[in-house]
Amino acid sequence: MQQTILASAFVVFVTGVVGVCERSIAEPVNQTVPADTGVQAAERASEPNDLPPTPEQILRRMADFYRGVQRFQVDICRTMRAELQGQVENLSEQMTLAIQRPNRLAWHVKNEGQRIDVLSDGTNLTIHAAELKQYTQEKAPAS
């Protein structure tokens, strides 16, 4: 069961699913970071006659930008439309992700009444599935 919850949490995180944050372990962000976090900067850096930046260049610039950020929080709402064998289903998910360096994390996912919380205080990593009334806790990774 623990592996299933961990795998589900990883899939949800990688696909960008997002949930409502009731409690954040990261301090509030006091400054607004513009959405221009690398893509537009990479485009502006190229000369009019130059080729557009490659995806690798864009990702590298974005990674460089985020490497210098000490903490941030993002709220995302995603709606998906799934069609399987003629049946259509619309799924809504909300997520709040708050990160503070060096290794603190609060990630709250809410999907149609189901909720998963992933928390790290720098020492322990806790994954809580509220609807299952289960949680797992292990030593937090170093980074």
Image (cartoon, rainbow, N blue to C red):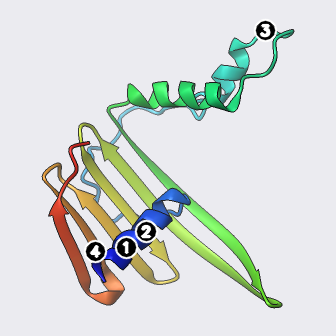
Label 3 secondary element: loop
Q: Which residue is mark 4?
A: 128
- Which image quarter: residue 90? bottom right
Find out whether the residues at labels 1 and 4 contact each other: C-beta distance under 8 Å: yes
For marks 2 and 4, the one nearer the N-term is 2
Label 2 secondary element: strand
Q: Residues within 10 Å of mark 3 (few under 14, many from 20)?
A: few
Q: Which residue is mark 1?
A: 116
Residue 45 located left or right of residue 50 = left
Q: Which residue type does callout 2 highlight? A: Val
Q: Residues within 10 Å of mark 2 (few under 14, many from 20)?
A: many
User: Compared to 96, does 67 lie above or below?
Assistant: above
- Distance from disc 1 to disc 3, alpha carbons, whole Å, reads 45 Å
For marks 1 and 3, the one nearer the N-term is 3
Q: Which residue is mark 3?
A: 47
Q: Which residue is mark 2?
A: 109
Closer to the camera: disc 3 or disc 2?
Answer: 3
For marks 1 and 4, the one nearer the N-term is 1
For marks 4 and 3, the one nearer the N-term is 3
- Distance from disc 3 to disc 2, alpha carbons, whole Å, reads 41 Å
Residue drawn 43% across the image and 58% down it? 96
- Distance from disc 4 to disc 3, alpha carbons, whole Å, reads 49 Å
For the N terminus, the image quarter is bottom left
